[in-house]
Every structure is written in C-alpha cells, then in structure tokens.
Image: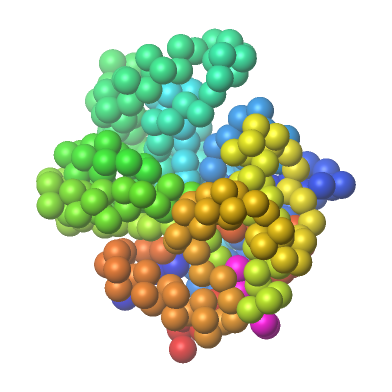
C-alpha cells in the first residue's frame, strides 16, 4: 500500500508576512495529519524572499507542537551548508521533543552563489564533495560513535533519508542502506533510472532492511479542471520567475496563465511539470494511480503551493479522499 505525505516550502505570499507563512504551514500540517498523511516535510532554502523554511529545524519545532501523530522532517536539509555536528544537535533536540516522529532528509545541492557562500562562511562546492563522508559522520554522531559526543544527538533516532534529483543520491542511498526520495516534482529527468539503480544496488542496513523509495508530485485538485489549472498558476509563475532570475513572493493565480506564455516558456513548464496531478479529484486520483504504477513508489509526497492556503488544504483533503476510494 502506498503512503502519502506533504512537502511544504513555507511559501511567503505576495502582500503577506512571514508570520502568516508560518501559520499557513502549521495549518497545512494539521490538515495533513487529519487527512491520514504519513509525513510532513519542510525544505531548506536560503536568501529567497518567497520561501521561509531556511531555519528548518525551528520551523519543524513549530509544526511538531501543532501536531501529535504525523511524522515531521526535512525534505531536506542541505548538508553542505552545515556541519554534521550542528545537524546532530538540532535533530537530536527534535527527536527528544517529538520522539518517534522525526525524519532527516539530506541533500547535497548547496544551491548557492558566491554571496550566500560568503554569508554562510562555507566553500559550498567543496563541502558538496564531502557529502557522503558527512552523511556517514552524521550517522556516527547519532549512534554515539563519533570522536565528539553530541548532546543532544547521541542516542537520537531520526529516520535518515537521502534526497536527490540525479543518479548520485540513488547510488549513495543504496550503498548506505537508507530510504531514498526523488525530487521529481521539479527535476523529473532521471526519475526512472534513479529508482531502478537504487533498488538494484540496495544494501540492507540496520536502518532499512529493503529499498524504500519516495517520489514527489505537484498536486492541485479543485471542483473543476479549469479551477485546478488556475490554482496551479501561482506555482507556474514561481517556476518562470526562478528560471528567469527574478524569484520573489508567491503571486496570486491567473486564469489561462500557461496559455499566455511564449512557446519556449510553455515547453519549460511542461517539462519540469511531468510529475504533476492537476484536475478534479477523480482526475487527480487517476494521475496519481498511473504515477504509482510507473514508479512503484512506496510513498508519494505532494508538493504544490497555492496563493490561498485554504485551497491547498482543500486540494489535499479532496485528493486523499479520492485516492482512498
């Protein structure tokens, strides 16, 4: 049976505040828990006006205090931005506050230009090369087997994941015997090959006896297909703004937005949006079913910000009802 989860970037909407963004993330997490979702993940981004999840562990504490059952975690922590010791302390703290509920998804993409590298006091490209070593060190810190004992951290048991959008992460997750999540919601090109490689080369570990794969989808469900397409247009505008070097806050939806773009931009959106379910609850459920049949994913994680937070909650609730049926 496939499980369903939610990935949230904690979007900051045009004309609204950071406070309202964190409140919307909390409300979405509560709705996801009530709808029967397995996990609620927050992604780390920095120096982006429209994304408020940079202090990921702090946001997760906020989410944890508002929920009681759903697993919460990072989708992901970009480990090159940090020392493994710092992350062991942060997620050891979360594990103590919310025992048995913490996931630690790890990515190696620094996603940073020279200015952010200077702000973080890191050579992020060199740090990215150390990613496999740092993941191993982080496991040792949680096991209490590192040179320095992390307190909190040592003895903590967050579920560690490797995240990826290429074959590298699949290879590492397989070698270390960790669950693997693929970012197909914005980088679908290597999805099938990455999952094949991960399952083929997986080496069982104490943490994970057999391969466990998650794939991400964009989700926008509404009463009509036209309404769902309009709902999705806020994210489409964000994709276009990012690809043209003009990222900003999440904008209100625009009916017919995709059709208003030049062919090159439409092609770009069609390409990066291959793993998307947009339409009525029935249409979305069928798309999700086909995606599961293609990927054989153990879990699907739904991404997709909406300008009206309540419409994302309603989209998720309708979808969960439809896939259950």
Give the quarter of the image for residue 225: bottom right
Question: Is 251 situated above or below 302?
Answer: above
Residue in the picture at 31% in, 48% down:
190
* Image x and y of residue 239, in percent: 61, 47
| Colour theme | rainbow
Question: Is 88 situated above or below 301?
Answer: above
Please give the count of numbered marks on the rendered protein.
Answer: 0
Camera-side residue of 306 and 39: 306
* Image x and y of residue 61, in percent: 60, 44
Residue in the picture at 53% in, 49% down:
268
Give the quarter of the image for residue 116: top right
**Which residue sits furthest right?**
15
**Which residue sits furthest bottom?**
325
Q: Is any atom of residue 119 visible in this view?
A: yes
* Image x and y of residue 16, in percent: 84, 47
Camera-side residue of 291 and 210: 291
Residue in the picture at 44% in, 67% down:
4
Camera-side residue of 163 and 91: 163
Q: Is any atom of residue 83 visible in this view?
A: no
Q: Which residues are magenta?
A: 220-224
Residue in the picture at 67% in, 41% down:
241
In the image, residue 222 lies in the stretch drawn in magenta: yes
In the image, residue 51 lies in the stretch drawn in magenta: no
Q: Taken as a whole, is the magenta stretch helix, strand or loop? A: loop
* Image x and y of residue 57, in percent: 56, 38
Question: Is 120 situated above or below 174?
Answer: above
Tell me the quadrant of the picture where the N terminus can be found. Answer: bottom left
Camera-side residue of 296 and 225: 225
Residue 305 lies left or right of residue 36; in this view the side is right
């Amino acid at each position: 049976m496939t499980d369903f989860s939610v990935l949230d970037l904690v979007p900051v909407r045009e004309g609204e505040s950071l406070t309202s963004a964190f409140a919307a993330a909390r409300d979405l997490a509560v709705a996801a828990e009530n709808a029967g979702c397995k996990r609620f993940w927050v992604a780390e981004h920095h120096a982006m006006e429209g994304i408020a999840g940079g202090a990921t562990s702090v946001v997760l504490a906020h989410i944890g205090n508002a929920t009681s059952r759903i697993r919460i975690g990072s989708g992901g922590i970009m480990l090159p931005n940090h020392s493994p010791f710092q992350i062991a302390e942060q997620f050891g703290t979360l594990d103590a506050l919310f025992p048995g509920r913490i996931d630690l998804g790890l990515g190696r993409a620094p996603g940073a230009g020279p200015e952010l590298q200077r702000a973080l006091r890191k050579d992020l490209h060199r740090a990215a090369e150390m990613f496999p070593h740092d993941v191993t060190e982080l496991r040792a810190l949680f096991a209490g087997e590192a040179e320095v004992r992390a307190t909190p951290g040592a003895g903590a048991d967050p579920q560690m994941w490797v995240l990826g959008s290429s074959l590298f992460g699949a290879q590492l997750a397989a070698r270390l015997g960790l669950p693997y999540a693929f970012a197909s919601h914005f980088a679908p090109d290597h999805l099938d090959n990455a999952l094949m490689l991960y399952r083929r080369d997986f080496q069982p570990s104490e943490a994970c006896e057999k391969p466990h794969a998650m794939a991400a989808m964009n989700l926008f469900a509404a009463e009509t297909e036209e309404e769902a397409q309009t709902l999705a247009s806020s994210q489409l505008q964000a994709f276009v703004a990012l690809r043209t070097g003009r990222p900003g806050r999440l904008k209100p939806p625009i009916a017919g937005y995709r059709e208003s773009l030049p062919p090159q931009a439409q092609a770009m959106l069609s390409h990066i949006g291959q793993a998307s379910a947009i339409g009525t609850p029935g249409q979305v459920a069928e798309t999700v079913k086909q995606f599961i049949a293609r990927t054989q994913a153990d879990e699907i994680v739904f991404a997709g910000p909406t300008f009206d937070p309540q419409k994302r909650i309603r989209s998720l609730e309708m979808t969960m009802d439809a896939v259950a049926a």
